[in-house]
Amino acid sequence: MGESGVCVNNFILPADQPVVRLEVETAFNCLTPSEKLYSHFLSKACWYGGLIVLYQTSPESPDIFRLIHAINTSETVDSLRQKCSAAGLSEDDVTAYLVYCSGFYANMGNYKGFGDCKFIPGLEKDKLELLVKCSTAAQSNKTIDQIWTKVKDRMYSLTCQEQQLGLGKKGLTKYFTSNCDTSDSDLVNQYLQHKHMEGYINRVFKTEVNGKVCYEIRNAGVINSTICEEEYNGVIFKVTTGDYQELLQMVCDNLKEAEKHVSNENEANMIKEYIKSFSLGSLDAHKNGSRFWIKNKGPIVETYIGFIETYRDPAGMRGEFEGFVSMVNKKVSEKFQVLVDKAEELLPKLPWPAEFEKDSFLRPDFTSLDVLTFSGSGVPAGINIPNYDEIRQSEGFKNVSLGNVISSSYKVTTKNTFVSDQDDLLLKKFKVPSFEIQVGLHELLGHGSGKMLYKTPTGLNYPEDLKNPLTGELISSAYGPGETYDSKFTDFGSSYEECRAECAGLHLCLVPGVSEIFGFSGAEADDINYVNWLSMVHAGIKGLEMFSPASMEWKQAHSQARFVITQVMLAAGEDFLRVEKTTGEDGNPDLLITMDRSKIATVGAPAISKFLVELQVYKSTGDVKGARKMYEGYSVVSGEGEKPWLLWRDIVISRKKPRTILVQGNTVLENETMNLVQYDPTPAGMLQSWRERFPETAKLDSVLASIGAREEKYWPC
């Protein structure tokens, strides 16, 4: 136990942390020399931009990166091992350091990208100090000791507030300065709606100017500028540009190089707009770049970059930086193209009335990609972007399934927790194909479906006599001028939308013919559909790990969504789904999930269908009050009642398995040839990949220190 009775082991990555290589060599070698150069410079832009996540995560993350990266780039792992051994450290101590560094690089900070929970080194503070001091970096650079002194306490601290990300007393965030709480977030949100602004590319800095509260809404951009300054609701609001400017300059420099190797005009225009966006701090320019990206159908090299997903902003509005570069897997993409071709037949199978669906289906690109580079706080399995409402609703979007991520991350070799031996065998056999189908349906017909109802001075985009299916009365709420889904659904919007997309996948996988699109039929298709439904509940139970007892909040959007779906299935009754406390083979408390697969069609499917209508209608009408009441009701994690989930969470934690860390390769220009360098799937291989990713260590350290110095007064470390 640590401070305040905290079980420290729950915040340490295990010594046997699984690490796998993201295989991409075959796809990369199929590229032309020009396409390889395009991929190379796009990847560099993504990696430099990914470092921005350090400044979006925790006050100490940038300096922890500076510390470990200086150590890891100054000598090889073998050299460090020898020095540590001579200093009296054990091999286990060095392994714990390597695992911590691997986790830090993979999550781009000291909080897990999936779950927002802090993790700390697995060796004692005094031993890590010894490792730092005996390293080549510390012996040749006095700055290393200063950085260590600055971060060592915060690296290990596990106060209630520091255990997870959040706003105010509920956790840490870098999207708002440390003197902000929910009331500040609400006021800033009001101002953004008043100005018809969105929050994707900004952070909020609260200060006092001449005795008045001042909120600086600082946009990400290379240039320093003040866009406007005015008083609103008794406080001063100042909109500026200049956040992360040095890193964004590096992003722009590499995008300019990539522009020299584009394949078509859409790619050229896309990159020009991205450069404009990152240079000027212009969200409109990024939207324009996204429009060109949508038009770029079926590229050989697929890429997207910017401030994209809002999961980690406590207010659900500000995007975390991410970027990816990938190659299209044509064979697998053919299946997804068939799904796109059949989308107009499948959309009417969704359970809501036609008036709540888009007026016309905007045929998207849907491809399976082999990822070369993915920067940010984690690597997803599938994506539906852009996230901008006005583009998705009326212009289009793209869906991507990250094929080599799924095959690398979702294979199960050990016994699955919380299921019977028979279900364990089915999960091992069909988890990957069932997940591929779920990802396809989730992205294309989940995120890609549904209409948002708008009421503006120019009129309505829905019939005046349209009735609400939930009440039978005329529609009484809709989105107004300046309102978006993110601005209305704020803190729970990401999870709510993921829940809607997951339910769409569950609903549609049962539609005759869908499994056949992916090459499965008969008894095998039935098994895959069962595994899909069972996997959803399995993920919902395992997801209790992502609920924070310290703040009594969910810290991962997908986990909350899957838990909610589990509650809906349990509420369906008729003994369709049971979750019970048992005793495991090891004699310790355990849980057992039992799903009656014969009742999926008769009990499970109607329950999910009814719930899906509720989700869509609340979203379509912008009825935040109704949506929140319903969704938060299903999200409750209580220690009382027939199913004391809060107590059962301890069982989940005791049997949790770590998420896989992916080792990504680097592209290197050698003898006028662009080559792919891949690394061993070990913590040492992970460190080597990052050492070779940023060879100009002194320049990079200076950039990171410069940004950190500007921020220090807002988030004292």
Image (cartoon, rainbow, N blue to C red):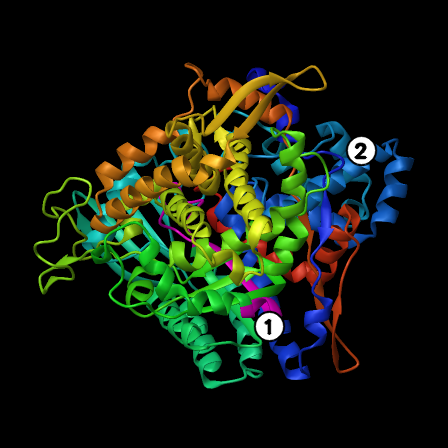
User: Which quarter of the rendered picture does the N terminus lie within?
Assistant: top right
Disc 1, SS: helix
Q: Residue at x 81, y 44 (%)?
A: 135
Amino acid residing under circle 1: Lys
From mark 2 to mark 1, how far is it between C-alphas? Answer: 45 Å
Dot 1 corresponds to which residue? Answer: 330
Name above or below for residue 562 compared with residue 671: above
Q: Count numbered badges in the picture.
A: 2
Which of the marked residues, 2 or 1, is nearer the chain's N terminus? 2
Few, some or many residues within 10 Å of mark 1 (<14, 14–19, 20+): some
Disc 2, SS: helix
Q: Horizontal placement of 399 versus 616: left or right?
A: right
Residue 324 on the magenta segment: yes
Q: Residue at x 9, y 47 (%)?
A: 474
- Highlighted magenta segment, given as a residue range: 309-334
Q: Which residue lies most toward the front here? A: 522
Of tags 2 and 1, which is closer to the observer? Answer: 1
Whole-percent x and y of residue 230? 20, 54
Amino acid residing under circle 2: Asp
Dot 2 corresponds to which residue? Answer: 93
Residue 469 on the magenta segment: no
Q: Is residue 332 in view from this perspective?
A: yes
Judging depth in this view, the residue of 571 and 170 nearest the camera is 571
Q: Is residue 142 in view from this perspective?
A: no
Whole-percent x and y of residue 23? 71, 60
